[in-house]
Amino acid sequence: MAGAPAGLPPGSVIGILGGGQLGRMIALAAARLGYRCHVYCPEEDAPAAEIATLATRADYGDEAALDAFAGAVDVVTLEFENVPAEAVMRIAETVPVRPDAKALAVAQDRVAEKNFLNAIGVATARFREVASAGDLRRAMADIGAPAILKTARLGYDGKGQRAVGPGDDPEAAWRQLGAGRAILEARVDFEREVSTIVARGRDGSTAAFDTAENAHENGILRTSRVPARIPSAVDGEARALAARIAGALDYVGVLTVEFFVAGDGALLANEIAPRVHNSGHWTLDACAASQFEQAVRAACGLPLADAARHSDAVMTNILGAEAGDWPRIAAEPGACLHLYGKADARPGRKMGHVTRLTPRGSETA
Ligand code: AMP
């Protein structure tokens, strides 16, 4: 059609770095639009590889495998942010990677991430970079208590972090964390945790989903609900901040921003994820186009879909042995059941999720 941006045609192959359930749901969305997927991950029995057309099982440091993968796909996206930057840069010599290595570098390092956010006017908890027990002692004096010490890299689902109280010995706390670099953050007395997922296309257009309210158990997401119980002005602010972050990174793809909401409605960004996110699974059932479809559209250069929501929703993760409950959930009227095809129901492992929809506006904000 005249004037419409030309994206990758159906039949093209999308490479996905990472083989988990997020990649699986990207591959399902890609299939709906006529694309094929090639999953690259080191793990056996990867939920994404199970349903993709092609799969490469290799380490992220395997240069020959990376080159073969890059040569076999039309564009690459990722479902896992800790893919080594070198691997992404190597692939990017052959084929576009969306989002790119620059966005990944910011999201992979909590110090770089918070410095970047503050530099573009997005507030975070107060923090100090820490690289030794002496640094930690000084940071504890600056930040005060209570505080949280987090490894700078490779932390997720609350791993690689510990609380630091006023009487704690910095030497012992530093030893116990066992990291080379870390960040000490003030503990935020938040009222709620929310996240906003924004897609940004190649043309710079953005589409943000409604902000979701998240509840965690043992550091793992348990439920996400929309609408979040926050004033609409706060939702608007969260979406604007997410779009600002994506713009500042010249980002192409889906980006998630997790925020703390203070009692007065002030937003502090906690973390950005350069990918689709567990807190956006509700979009599969409550929107015409999900976060996964937006990731595919952005990567392939298609116009973004409308991010409007037609229903209120509560998404609940199905963890570990709870997966045995699937017959009951499958029989529940209106429950949208998603299972990831994982055989081993280890405690806390994300086995699937269920989204329960109600008519839009039936949940009071
Ligand atoms: P993170 O790995 O940074 O996403 O942190 C995991 C969880 O720990 C968050 O979802 C919060 O519930 C809690 N948390 C992390 N940082 C802070 C903070 N600075 N203040 C209060 N709670 C925090």
Image (spheres, helix red, strand yellow):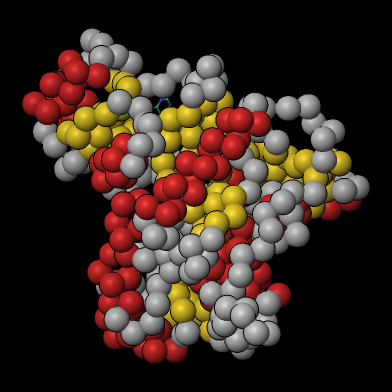
Residue 217 location (% of width, % of height):
56, 32
Percent across and percent down for residue 198 are 54, 52
Quadrant of the rendered image holding ligand 1 = top left
Residue 117 can be seen in this image: yes
Res. 6 image quadrant = bottom right
Quarter residue 93 falls in:
bottom left
- Residue at (29% x, 56% y) in the render: 105
Residue closer to the observer: 21 or 342: 21
Q: Residue furthest top?
A: 167
Q: Quadrant of the N terminus?
A: bottom right
Residue at 44 percent of width and 53 percent of height: 246
Front one among 290 and 331:
290
Residue lying at 41% horizontally and 21% vertically, measured from the top left? 188
Question: Residue 194 falls in which quadrant of the image?
Answer: top right
Residue 253 visible somewhere in the drawing: no
Residue in the foreground of this view, choosing between 212 and 40: 212
Q: Position of residue 165 (x, y in %)?
A: 29, 15
Q: Residue at x 14, y 37 (%)?
A: 131
The residue nearer to you, when weighing 232 against 219, is: 232
| Residue 271 image point, x, y percent | 41, 41
Report the quarter where the C terminus lies: top right
Residue furthest front as drawn = 3
Position of residue 90 relative to residue 225, above or below, is below
